[in-house]
Image (cartoon, helix red, strand yellow):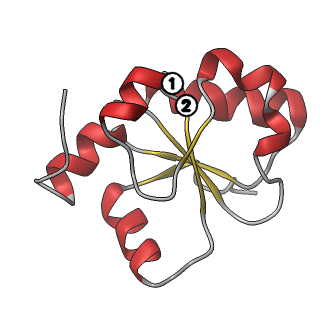
């Protein structure tokens, strides 16, 4: 049996947001990064606080984990799936850097 994809491309995320899909956006970067730039509607749950804030991440309906380049979001996804059994998670492939490059050239980069 093939497992569900764990990554979503910036273009697919953009299409789903434009279509009004009910997605929870969880940004796992640190406070300063989030303050500098973040996707509208995203909630900050830094990777360093993830273990004690998992109750803020819904377990039903798609939740998209976001970071700078996609590494921390995959770490968060792996932890949440393997340790806590979450089955509804996607990681933004390439993070906000890829979002700026592929979807919104005006999005701040760092």
Which one is nearer the viewer's eye here, 81 or 95? 95
Tag of residue 82 = none
Q: Position of residue 5 (x, y in %)?
A: 58, 54
Q: Residue at x 82, y 62 (%)?
A: 60
Q: Quadrant of the C terminus?
A: top left
Residue for badge 1: 72
Q: Is residue 48 left or right of residue 84?
A: left
Up-down relation of residue 57 to residue 75 (above or below): below
Q: Is residue 76 left or right of residue 88?
A: left
Classify residue 68 by image quadrant. Answer: top left
Which one is nearer the viewer's eye here, 21 or 107? 107
- Nearer the observer: mark 2 or 1; the answer is 2
Q: Position of residue 7 (x, y in %)?
A: 50, 48
Q: Position of residue 35 (x, y in %)?
A: 38, 33
In contact (CB < 8 Å): disc 2 and disc 1: yes
Which one is nearer the viewer's eye here, 2 or 48? 48
Q: Quadrant of the N terminus?
A: bottom right
Q: Residue at x 68, y 29 (%)?
A: 78
Secondary-structure class at tag 2: loop
| Label 2 to label 1: alpha-carbon separation | 7 Å
Q: Residues within 10 Å of mark 2 (few under 14, many from 20)?
A: many
Q: Earlier in the sequence, mark 2 or mark 1?
A: 2
């Amino acid at each position: 049996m093939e497992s569900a994809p764990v990554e979503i491309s910036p273009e697919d995320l953009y299409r789903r947001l434009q279509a009004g899909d009910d997605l929870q956006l969880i940004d796992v970067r640190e406070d300063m990064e989030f303050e500098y730039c973040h996707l509208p509607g995203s909630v900050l749950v830094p990777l360093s606080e993830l273990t004690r804030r998992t109750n803020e991440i819904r377990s039903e309906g798609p939740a998209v984990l976001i970071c700078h380049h996609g590494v921390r979001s995959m770490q968060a996804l792996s932890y949440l799936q393997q340790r806590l059994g979450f089955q509804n998670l996607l990681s933004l492939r390439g993070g906000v850097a890829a979002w700026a490059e592929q979807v919104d050239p005006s999005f701040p980069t760092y």
